[in-house]
Amino acid sequence: MKIHYLSFEVVLSQYPRLTAEGFVDTDSPKFNASRELLESEGDRVKRVRQWIDKNLNPLLSYSAKINNSRTSYRIKTYAEQELGHIYNGVFIASMLCEGFLIGKESQNVSFNVSNKALRDIEE
């Protein structure tokens, strides 16, 4: 299975409910401000993508399952050790750009990331 990389602009277009806080309902009072904040984080997305490329591997079979053992919020804490504060939505967008799949759209999502890669970054 081939990884399909996406631009940040494509991710924003394909996931209209994605904000700096993660996926939220568009009728939320914070939606517009949080979406605008995410849209302004393009440079940060580039740096997070570099960290993801270096540290995480997707499960690459057609039957690959979403790994629910850790959510975006937890995984991003490992990237923050190297990069400083990262909005959860920036991390989610970066993972989507790098070709990872997500489970249910929610504030904290799970990805098709390998357990080995997760164990490696936790050491």
Image (tube, helix red, strand yellow):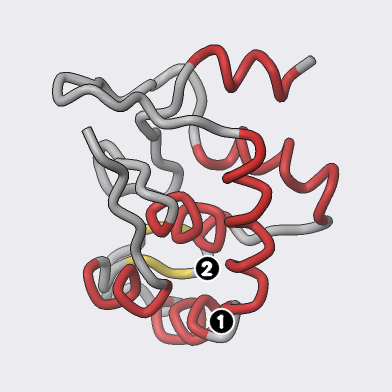
Circle 2 sits on which residue? 20
Relative to 11, is 45 on the left or the right?
A: right
In the visual, does 31 lie left or right of 41?
A: left
Amino acid tagged 2: Ala
Disc on res. 37: 1
Q: Is residue 46 above or below residue 103?
A: below
The one of 106 and 45 positioned closer to us in this rendering: 45
Q: Quick check: marks 2 and 1 in contact, CB under 8 Å? A: yes
Left or right of residue 109: residue 54? right
Residue flagged by tag 1: what amino acid is it? Leu
Residue 5, x across and y down, in percent: 35, 57
- Residue appearing at x 79%, y 15% in the figure: 123
Residue at point 25%, 40% (across, down): 2
> Quick check: 37 above or below 78?
below
Q: In which quarter of the image is residue 68?
A: top left
Nearest the eye: 107 or 54: 54
Q: In which quarter of the image is residue 49?
A: bottom right
